[in-house]
Image (spheres, rainbow, N blue to C red):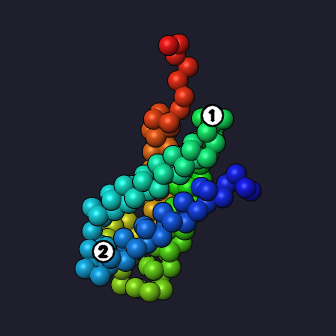
Amino acid sequence: MKKFTLPIRFGIATSGCLIAYFLVLSLFNLHVNGFYSLFNSIITGFGIYEAIKFTKVLKGKTFNYRQGFAAGITTGFLATLIFTIFFAFYATEINIDFLPELSKVWFKEYHTGEGLLFFTVAIMGFATTVVLTLAFMQLFKSSNNLK
């Protein structure tokens, strides 16, 4: 468990930033526009980058690809999980008018429930986490090239 304390802390901090960003958008009624969710990947990416960077600093010369990848995946997955739970709570308990306003056409024409929307939010977060972790590990991995 000790090896995951740093990524867990970064995951909780990242999810806090995602929630704060969502609530700031909701103050201006911009949270119904899907375009603003693109900034979520920047917030998540920053959290993943910092988690991998601090893991590399903490491990020093013993840092390897597996440790960095695990730190990035743990950070992003935890942040996504916490944010998805908050999103579901917000949409079903705090602001009941949020889901119909978010996608008026989607719910009328395709007869889908809110579960699909929550699943989509989670999958988007998990996919973003995997892609960004793989991309950032290209920066942090050690080279095997001869000098």
Q: Is residue 96 above or below residue 59?
A: below
How many residues crowd mark 1 within 10 Å: few (<14), some (14–19), many (20+)? few
Earlier-in-chain disc, 2 versus 1: 2
Indicate left or right for 65 with 140 as reference.
Answer: right
Q: Residue at x 64, y 42 (%)?
A: 59
SS label for mark 1: helix
Q: Which residue is mark 2?
A: 25
How many residues crowd mark 2 within 10 Å: few (<14), some (14–19), many (20+)? some
* Residue 119 or residue 12, whichever sits in front: 12
- In which quarter of the view is residue 20 placed? bottom left
Q: Residue at x 57, y 42 (%)?
A: 56
Q: Amino acid at mark 2?
A: Leu
Q: Amino acid at mark 1?
A: Lys
Q: Residue at x 44, y 86 (%)?
A: 94
Expressed as whole percent of the image width and height from the top left, the position of residue 53 reads 51, 46
Q: Which residue is mark 1?
A: 61
Q: Residue at x 52, y 55 (%)?
A: 76
